[in-house]
Amino acid sequence: MSVQPTVEAKAAAPAASGSPELLISSLLRYGVMVSLGLVVFGMGVTFFHHPDYFSSVDALQRLTTEGNWPHQLSDVMAGVLATRGQAIAMVGLLVMMAVPVARVALALLIFRQQRDRVFVAVTSVVLALLVLSFLLGHAE
Amino acid sequence: MTPFFFVTVVFTISVVAGLLGSLLGLGGGLILVPILTLLLKVDIRYAVGASIVSVIATSSGAAAAYVRDRLANLRVAMFLEMATTAGALTGAFLAGVVGGRGLYLIFGAVMGYSAVAMLRKLGAQADAPVPPDALADRLGLHSSYFDEATGREVDYRVTRPLTGLGLMYAAGAVSGLLGIGSGALKVPAMDLAMRLPLKVSTATSNFMIGVTAAASAGVYFARGDIDPFIASPVCLGVTLGAFVGSRYLTKLKSGWLRVLFVGVLLWVAFEMLRKGWAG
């Protein structure tokens, strides 16, 4: 974040609309927005459901003790269906984690369309490692 | 402390961490994890879990602009991500093995190193010719960017991609282990070893950090280290701080601020090392 492009740079070096750069840029921006929206909503629901969180001192201990939040996709989904704020916020955090994965998947499609064999292979390796991280985490 | 007060404090600290991070070209993680653990007594595993998600947020947000302006080199990024994701996976698993005390010690050491690296960056770097590299040619890594300072398109060539790959594996492992973006390790690898222009290195590093962090975040989530009650205010705060910082505060960046920051980094590194040592 140390080098910030200015308005002049945007005007001087525009990426053509529909170009790979612009597609990836939009995916990143909207992905982050959706995620943050869900996180805010989830936190709002949490405090709405638990007015005691404004006054109780003991509740914090419980909220930051292991095992009191969902850490499996099935738990998260069940929590969302029960409109539990923590679960909704967790969906937002999961969307955030999925944004880079979606970015790599999009790059894979773009390289395929450009018939760039070497980079289709490179991108596939990255995508496989990302999928592996989610699978391995559960196997642990 | 009530839960509401806790969330408010964490959010406020995160905004400041995001602001400082964007101001100094570091992620918020390096600042945030020590504050959460030393000041608010949050378990270091959950601090790291919260930090890693905020790292993805700031990286993706910043990368959106860098990619659109063609400052980040997508091909170099994708090539090196093979190494950073493999490293991040290794690191995230090692975190489970190393345990709390070891994490404090390693975190302190990396912070100390980052501080010294930032000091060195204060000095200018000489312009030597870039040695030709057959693999870099074959992968088509060379590119160009638009330099706003001179108003010209600048062509650049890339060299030693395999050295870069090795260094990135190490950077990825540190990132997965500590829940930080480890941009302080990525930028020198591209800047010094692969000879990308500093602006391109910084932008590409930012772009890659999201994918590196996502690889370890998956493991953290499955292990139950991502507490939404801590991670949510951290994620929102850091993103907001970084956004405001990158928009309005880049002009404030100056030499003495960096020196001051290096001092703070060294002090916190010492505190983390002491905590790890004492157990």
Image: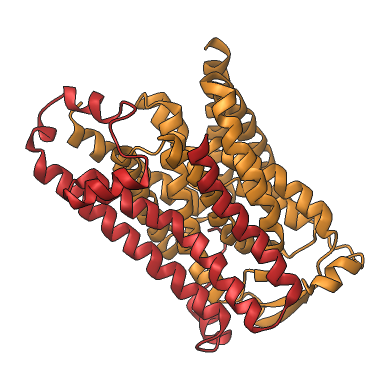
Residue at (50, 78) in percent of width and height: A23
- Coloring scheme used: by chain
Q: Which chain is red?
A: A
Residue at (34, 27) in percent of width and height: A66
- Image quarter of residue A35: bottom left
Q: Nearer the viewer, residue A3 or A61?
A: A61
In the image, residue B55 lies at what x, y percent?
Answer: 48, 50
Chain B color in figure = orange
Report the quarter where the N terminus of chain B lies. top left
- Image quarter of residue B9: top left
- Image quarter of residue B230: top left
- With B260 as the anchor, is B136 left or right in this view? right
In the image, residue B272 lies at what x, y percent?
Answer: 53, 23
- With B115 as the anchor, is B37 left or right in this view? left
Q: Is residue B95 visible?
A: yes
Residue at (24, 40) in percent of width and height: B8
Give the answer, above or below, for where B71 lies relative to B17.
below
- Tally of numbered tags: 0
Give the answer, above or below, for where A32 lies relative to B137.
above
Q: Residue furthest left?
A: A51
Give the answer, above or below, for where A1 lies relative to A24.
above
Give the answer, above or below, for where B145 lies relative to A50.
below
In the image, residue A139 lies at what x, y percent?
Answer: 51, 38
In the image, residue B95 lies at what x, y percent?
Answer: 56, 30
Q: Is residue B257 visible?
A: no
Residue at (59, 50) in percent of width and height: B255
Q: Nearer the viewer, residue B150 or A131?
A: A131
